[in-house]
Image (tube, helix red, strand yellow):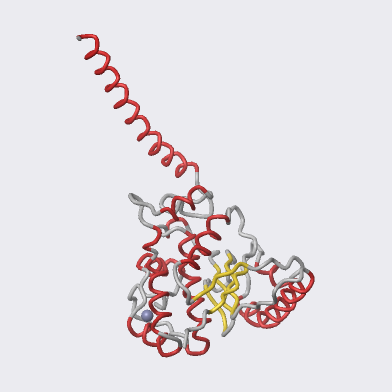
Amino acid sequence: MTERTTKIGIILPKIKNLDTRALKYLILYQNTLQDSFLFQFLPTQQDSQFLNYIESDKPINRQTVETKADKFIAEYSNFLRKNAKDYKLLEDLPDGFVILSIAKFEDHYYYTGDNNWTMVALGDWKRHMAPPSIVEFFMSLLIGSAIDIACRDKFPKSHHATRGCISDFAASISDVRLSVLTGFLCDSCSDTIKHARSEKLVTDAKDLLAKKWLGNVSEPSHVAETAKKLGYDLFRTKGVKQTFTESLLATVEQEGVKLILKIIGTVIVAALLLWLGLK
Ligand SMILES: [Zn+2]
């Protein structure tokens, strides 16, 4: 029997200053790398009190979010059904919803959820936590969410031991950086996922978490190059937006290479002219 793909519906509330083009591209590109998860962005519901609450600049209450989430998911699913009907689209609800946000919980949690929804709240993310960039935090925590949704109530529980695994228990967002950087899924979590779903889902999750498909600073992949053209340099930008210093360093680096090539070119032309002159 073929393993069923888990459809992950992503809700992206407003993220101040973040140009979301690259984030969306990087997330959707993962659909081409595996078939255990299908990531899909969903339209924003404009008049949702729940989403307005999440978009607040002030710290929000996690228990309030958890209490209201089920009602929101029900209302939001109705909104999607109505949208599909109005535009004569295929009604195709996801298996679970992930809210990627920069909300700040009063108790400084960065992740919460239940069987068919999770919420990532990176309001406490600070520049000193990079690398990895905030975009990579979003990407890894999305895979963690996708695993939880795929496994339903049999999801891997967090473990106290710090292994660099996506299910490491991290008391604060700054501790999550190790698992985002490492991109690892430990044996006990892999085993839990294998029994809840399949070996294939474990392999696919591991590949996505490791992010080898992005390349590195000296050899960025074509995906990382495209993300850069879409406004986000994964290897230089840390936060939601490139700072003046990051932009300056990138320019110096780029112009530096151009300058060296220009000098080499000038030397070759001068040598050629000299050689022709001597003849
Ligand atoms: Zn683990």
174 vs 260: above or below: below
In this view, the residue in front, 41 or 238, is 41
In this view, the residue in front, 204 or 228, is 204
- Residue 26 image position (x, y, % from top left): 50, 60
171 vs 27: above or below: below
- Residue 155 image position (x, y, % from top left): 47, 86
Left or right side of 52 for 28: left
Q: Quadrant of the C terminus?
A: top left
Report the residue that reaches farthest toward the left: 278
Left or right side of 79 for 137: left
At 72% from the left and 68% from the top, the residue drawn is 45
In this view, the residue in front, 271 or 239, is 271
Report the residue that reaches farthest toward the right: 86
**Tally of numbered discs:** 0
Left or right side of 210 for 240: right
25 vs 171: above or below: above
At 59% from the left and 79% from the top, the residue drawn is 96
- Residue 23 image position (x, y, % from top left): 53, 59
In this view, the residue in front, 226 or 248, is 226
The quarter of the rendering in which ligand 1 is drawn is bottom left
- Residue 203 image position (x, y, % from top left): 38, 77
Query: Which quarter of the picture shows residue 97?
Result: bottom right
